[in-house]
Amino acid sequence: MDYRYQDCCGEPEIVSCIHQFMERLPTLEGTPFVFIKKDGKKLVFDGPQRSFTRLYEMCSETLFTPGLHYSPQVEAFAKVMGQLRIKDLLVHGIGGHIVDRSGRLAAEVYNQALEALKVEVQSPDYRRKVSASVRRCEEAYNSGVGYVDALFKVHSRLLVGRIDLGFEKRLVMSIDLKQVDSFFKAFKNRLRATVLGQMLVGSIWCLECTRDRGFHYHMLVFFDGSKHQNHKHLVQQIGEQWVSSVERDLQTMKGFRPEPRTDLDSLATTPGKATFHNCNLSEYQKPFLGQINHDDVLLRERLRENVAYICKADQLLGVKLSRGMRTMGRGELPRIKAIRPGRPRKQPQPAGSTEPHKA
């Protein structure tokens, strides 16, 4: 396994692929390989689930680093993988006819692995762990929605922004999860000390791991809508603060070495930099960014949907440095002042179920 992943979770895309596969597993039919006897010989053909073997081609036992915490789906996959000694197959090659040192036919082991995983996902222990994960997601959603509702009790309107904070691929290849966490903590501390940070009235964030982007953060930010209007510019400034904060940390990081490149251009020794995507500059099918009045039922429901997405992303990451590391968070609940005399506010009613679902 490449050295740069030995201190984190392995290539982020692998963890994401495994989790998604385990979610689909109960609905899959057939086996990776099919055996047919003809003229006294056992012939091997690709089966309906031949693509299942791709997961094994991408990883080995070293992917699952001791001391890290994975989602129940990924842990179950690792458990079966270890029990069947899949690493032996990886050492000696991939293919339906490959035989390992023990004489096991790879195709037979793949079929056994798929069946073992199907048994595992039906076990009471697995179901209990998945249920606990879903429960944590629901609790996080209720906490996030309650936080946003509290902000609306203090402010008659909110200026809402969303930003994704990440890294160039060259930098992703050279840092581990611990450094990612350190970058984000330093960024929040520095932002809090700026004029821009003091303008913020709230935020919700989560760390996510995806196939194409590796580790990155989703962040919802809230400003007082009665004082600020230019949400695109404000979000852009937050992104620029992120880039400069990470650059500052990279310059002072002891022993840091960028991932070497094969070309000889001027970028050969540069580590890459932090990046961001200003979502307020994007067009959404269901717009929810910018000004939202406290009594706007439609926009507040769309905002809830995006809070739900963030809560779900937190569960899909499924890896932490330690049980004390946070992969999701929000600002402090605002202090709600005593009700002043006058006409009471019109309270908006949710436009649908409060159950979390993906935006």
Image: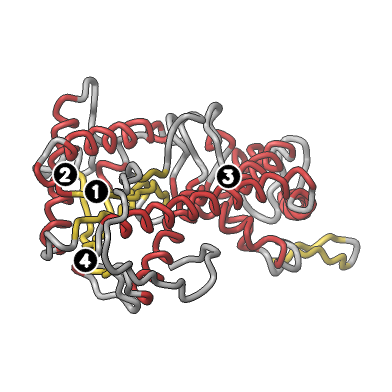
Numbered tag placed on residue 71 in the rendering: 3
Tag 1: Cα neighbours inside 10 Å, few (<14), some, or many (≥20)?
some
Mark 3 / mark 1, whichever is N-terminal? 3
Residue ID for mark 4: 280
Numbered tag placed on residue 98 in the rendering: none
Quadrant hosting residue 111: bottom right
Mark 3 / mark 2, whichever is N-terminal? 3
**Residue 58 placement, left or right of 154:** right
Question: Residue at point 37% right, 77% down?
Answer: 298
Q: Secondary structure at mark 3?
A: loop
Tag 2: Cα neighbours inside 10 Å, few (<14), some, or many (≥20)?
some
Tag 4: Cα neighbours inside 10 Å, few (<14), some, or many (≥20)?
many
Residue ID for mark 2: 197
Mark 4 / mark 1, whichever is N-terminal? 1
Tag 3: Cα neighbours inside 10 Å, few (<14), some, or many (≥20)?
some
Residue ID for mark 1: 168
Distance of mark 4 from mark 2, alpha carbons?
18 Å
Distance of mark 3 from mark 1, alpha carbons?
26 Å
Percent across and percent down for residue 103 are 78, 40
Distance of mark 3 from mark 2, alpha carbons?
33 Å
Question: Residue at point 38% right, 48% down?
Answer: 206
